[in-house]
Amino acid sequence: MKKLIIYIILLSFTFSSCSKPNKQNIENDKNATHNKKIIATWVTYEEIKMLIDATNSKNDFINLIYEKLNVLKNYKVNTIFLHVRAFDDCFYKSDIYPVSIYCSNKDGSLKYDVLEIFINICKLLDIKLHAWVNPYRIRNDSAINKINENTLAYKFINNKSEKIIITENVIYYNPAYVDIQKYIIDGIKEILENYSVDGIHIDDYFYPTTSTMIDNSIFTSYTVSGGKLSLNDFRRRNIDSLISSIYSLVKSYGDICFSISPNGDINKNYNVLFADVKKWLKEDGYVDYIIPQIYYGYENADMPFKSVINEWIHEDNSKIIIGLGLYKSGKKDNYAKSGENEWIFNYDIISRQIKDVYRNNYAGLSVFSSLLLTNKSDNSILEKEKINIIKTMEIYET
């Protein structure tokens, strides 16, 4: 393993699409950083499934995780967001949620306590672990017949309750209901009670649709009882309520972090997902960090990277971690219009974006995803980009 790490680092000085860095600029960037940056990555449920499928025993699983997390040290990663609840199930011991189908024995019991294992290995490697949950998402399809009978959602199927939202593509819990909020809060409390996590993290799964049909009954009841908010503001208030409740809960357990990774488009967050990210940044009692998913290239016709990060600038940027989309490397960016081929012909996009993070003195960066950083691929552009990332991080995090 040590030989592999040394080889990768040495190789990083051999291939680069960047010109030689200006030493004075680098020093200026480094001097602008007063606090140690959070260098993070997301470990998705897909990756957890792959790790489980690739091993035959708990010891093999532990060794493989150690190997993967150790590779992340090459990129100076000091924090991971571990997907412990991607849907209405989990990768840990729970009395509230059923076991994920990706981590269960034939009898439905928990195969490995993924969260516990990751926590123990992260402690050995001096990596912070934040438990990542998707609070509202039940399924990423419309197959109601596949909803686990041990979930809260199962109770709402037959009576066509508004408490679950069913669209053509997803099934969600409805954010408008108090008992749904309590269910989510209780799940997070269970994690905080039983596991020594460094943080709780959620991402951009808020309202799945703008349809007025999903909350017609409860919104009508709200207005009849004297409520004055518009439907959109009503929805934003519902999301605000959950976010502030999670924040208060997390802080009641001591020095634990709460972060949210919303969509990179501020307007979409506000008008489509009903997430008032500007409010969460401005006011106390909502978040420690916002991690916008700024998965855009510099040549994106509608959302060029530099313009987007400027929209996210906060008073001192101390609450902002920039999310970077390594998954686009070497691929066509279908929504970038005139910039659709940027990621195909350039292998220094992420490394340049890392430099922008330092120059603007953001709190840190997070790369999507861990799988791309730790696994070798036949995507030559991606592999060269990874070498450039190592080189860049060696410069800034020494």
Image (cartoon, grey):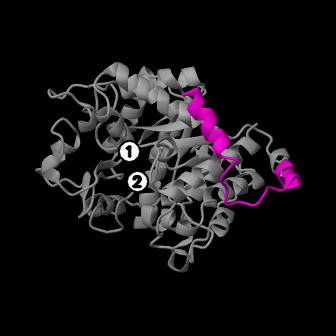
Amino acid type indicated by mark 2: Tyr
Is 5 placed left or right of 327 in the picture?
Answer: right
Query: Percent from the top left, x then y, of residue 250?
Result: 52, 32
Residue 275 is situated, as x and y percent measured from the top left of the image, at 49, 57
Picture coordinates of residue 334 (x, y %)? 44, 72
Give the residue pinned by disc 2. 205
Horizontal side of 97 relative to 297 (left or right) equals: left
Which picture quadrant has residue 274? bottom left
Residue at the spot 15% in from the left edge and 38% down from the top edge: 149
Q: Quarter of the image containing the N terminus?
A: top right
Q: Nearer the viewer, residue 215 or 257?
A: 257
Residue 2 is a magenta residue: yes
In the rendered structure, are the residues bearing label 1 and label 2 in contact, judged by CB atoms less than 8 Å apart? yes
Q: Decide: few, some or many residues near mark 1? Use Cα within 10 Å; few <14, some 14-19, many ≥20.
A: many
Q: Is residue 375 above or below residue 61?
A: below
What are the residue bounds of the magenta stretch? 1-28
> Residue shown at 74%/51% (left/top)?
358
Any mark on residue 43, and which?
A: none
* Position of residue 153 in the picture relative to residue 348 (left or right): left
- Residue type at mark 1? Pro
Question: Residues under labels 1 and 2: Cα distance?
Answer: 8 Å
Give the residue number, with chain letter if any, for mark 1. Answer: 135
Which element is circle 2 on?
Answer: loop
